[in-house]
Amino acid sequence: MAKARVTAEAEVPPPLPLAVLAALRPVAHRGEAVAEADGVWCFDDSKATNPHAALVAVEAHERVSRLAGGQVKGASLDAQIAERLC
């Protein structure tokens, strides 16, 4: 929706917005697909540097096999978020 709104506000005439939207790719380290093996994809979302961002990244996928990463660094990690991340 945000992508469509930006193109509409920029007054880009159709059908260009659809072609532009289809060609957009995530910025490096923000949900970037980095590898695939036997139908299992690996994504780099190292910019998700707090529990809430990590949760959004995890919930963007139907299944997550493994999530590895750094330290909480003083961020709030309530039980509900911790449960959904683990």
Image: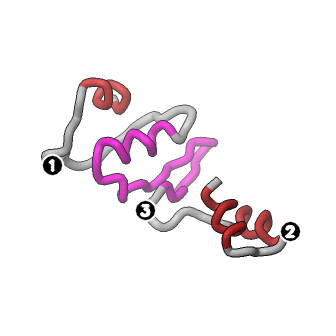
Q: Secondary structure at mark 2?
A: loop
Mark 2 closeness class: few <14, some 14–19, many ≥20 residues within 10 Å: few
Q: Secondary structure at mark 1?
A: loop
Q: How many marks?
A: 3
Residue 56 drawn at (x, y percent): 44, 42
**Mark sitting earlier along the chain (3/2):** 2
**Mark sitting earlier along the chain (1/2):** 2
Quarter of image, res 84 = top left
Of tags 1 and 3, the one toward the viewer is 1
Residue 53 drawn at (x, y percent): 37, 47
Residue at mark 3 to residue at mark 2: CA–CA distance: 30 Å
Q: Is residue 48 magenta?
A: yes
Mark 1 closeness class: few <14, some 14–19, many ≥20 residues within 10 Å: few
Residue at mark 1 to residue at mark 2: CA–CA distance: 46 Å
Residue on which disc 2 sits:
15
Of tags 3 and 2, the one toward the viewer is 2
Res. 29 mark: 3
Of tags 1 and 2, the one toward the viewer is 2
Q: Amino acid at mark 3?
A: His
**Mark sitting earlier along the chain (1/3):** 3
- Identify the residue at image location x=19%, y=47%: 71
- Name the colour scheme: secondary structure
- Identify the residue at image location x=62%, y=43%: 38
Residue on which disc 1 sits:
73
- Identify the residue at image location x=48%, y=37%: 59
Mark 3 closeness class: few <14, some 14–19, many ≥20 residues within 10 Å: some
Q: Amino acid at mark 1?
A: Lys
**The magenta segment:** 31-59
- Seen in the image, is 65 located left or right of residue 10? left
Residue at mark 1 to residue at mark 3: CA–CA distance: 20 Å
